[in-house]
Image (tube, grey):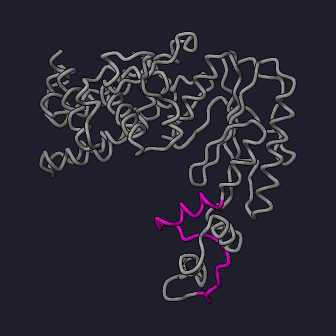
Amino acid sequence: MALVALVDDLCRELDRGSVTLLVLLDISAAFDTIDHGILLGRLSGMGLGGTVLQWLQSFLEGRSQLVKLGDTCSDPWPLTCGVPQGSILSPMLFNIYMKPLGEVIRSFGVRCHLYADDTQLYYSFPPNSKEAPRILDQCLAAVLAWMRANKLKLNPDKTEVLQVSRTSDRGIGWQPVLDGVALPLKAQVRSLGVLLDSALTLEAQVSAVAGRAFAQLKLVRQLRPYLEKSDLTMVVHALVTSRLDYCNALYVGLPLKTARKLQLVQRSAARFLTGADYRARSTPLFKELHWLPFIFRAQFKVQVITYKALKGLGPTYLRDRISPYEPARPLRSSGEALLSLPPTSQLRLVGTRERAFSAVAPWLWNSLPREIRQAPTLLSFRKSLKTWLFQKAFVD
């Protein structure tokens, strides 16, 4: 969902003709350097106190670490900072600790997205802006100062910057500066496991996913003599189709030439499980396995995210990107649970119309039958949606 929101913003700015610099900050040992005193003070400032605050203090303090090599152990060393990794509570505490940073960044008119220890800020400006270098450098300096004040360490050498624009090959004539280090503009960066390029084509991401998925499928083929079909199916889902499904909401609207690479992976997996000849058509195989084709799986993900956003089951930053359709006067469509479509004047590029969440989600949502849009629970919505998409894929 974080990447859906990020790519939506980047697409919309690209449509406006703006240049956007996406800065992916690298924090060294982020979870291990959280100061307990600062965190407890922040929790207290949120209104927590009494027994609850004592519980959290007990969760954080009184821990120690040691090194064990064979039967030999080092002396225990008390931990005065950090949150225990692997617990459900720790990421939430980390987000609370980092919350003021978002306010610092937004005070400069720069947008940001914080996902656990992954901090991304992005600044959009006209191509000929004279103020952009000063504003972004001031923002990065303020971020660095906040990090130091809160006992966190930024790593300028691992911080990456991506320029997203229609003329990215020309550059912008300057580089952002962090702690005296000029940050070079990269041709592509990895954000939350997804490769983003300067034109948001996702070609590098698709090629990387397809390559890894085919490599896994090649290894899985060696298990055929030893596993039943049901077990092989489970392994294929775990190692192959899970790679196709990761962040597949970003794949909606991709050009057929790009999407074809992932379609070939799914087709190969289906032929492997069914034992079909390599010349066999994929549609009957998908139907036999009850698999939605790749394109429909991506649409399924977008529509599920939309349902969650509308029902308060998802983050507000996605809910704010869509709005219910409200006609100026009472019409038959008033009770249809439709969404408003963005004005065409704001969707000049094909990439925006077909890929930006704020444009694609309302269009896909409005195409659903009313009874699916008005499903009472997420489980019933997912079940009805898959049935409808399955009929659309194999019957229509």
x, y percentage for residue 198? 63, 25
Magenta-colored stretch includes residue 143: no
Q: Which residues are magenta?
A: 74-97
The quarter of the picture where residue 339 lies is top left
Q: Residue at x 49, y 26 (%)?
A: 358
Res 142 visible: yes
Q: Nearer the viewer, residue 340 or 8?
A: 340
Q: Is residue 275 left or right of residue 176?
A: left
Q: Nearer the viewer, residue 154 or 125?
A: 125
x, y percentage for residue 70? 49, 84
Number of numbered labels in the structure image? 0
Taking 215 as reference, is 18 above or below it?
Answer: above
Taking 240 as reference, is 335 above or below it?
Answer: above
Q: Residue at x 53, y 22 (%)?
A: 201
x, y percentage for residue 114? 61, 48
Magenta-colored stretch includes residue 90: yes
Q: Nearer the viewer, residue 282 or 5?
A: 5
Q: Is residue 253 left or right of residue 394?
A: right
x, y percentage for residue 321? 52, 30
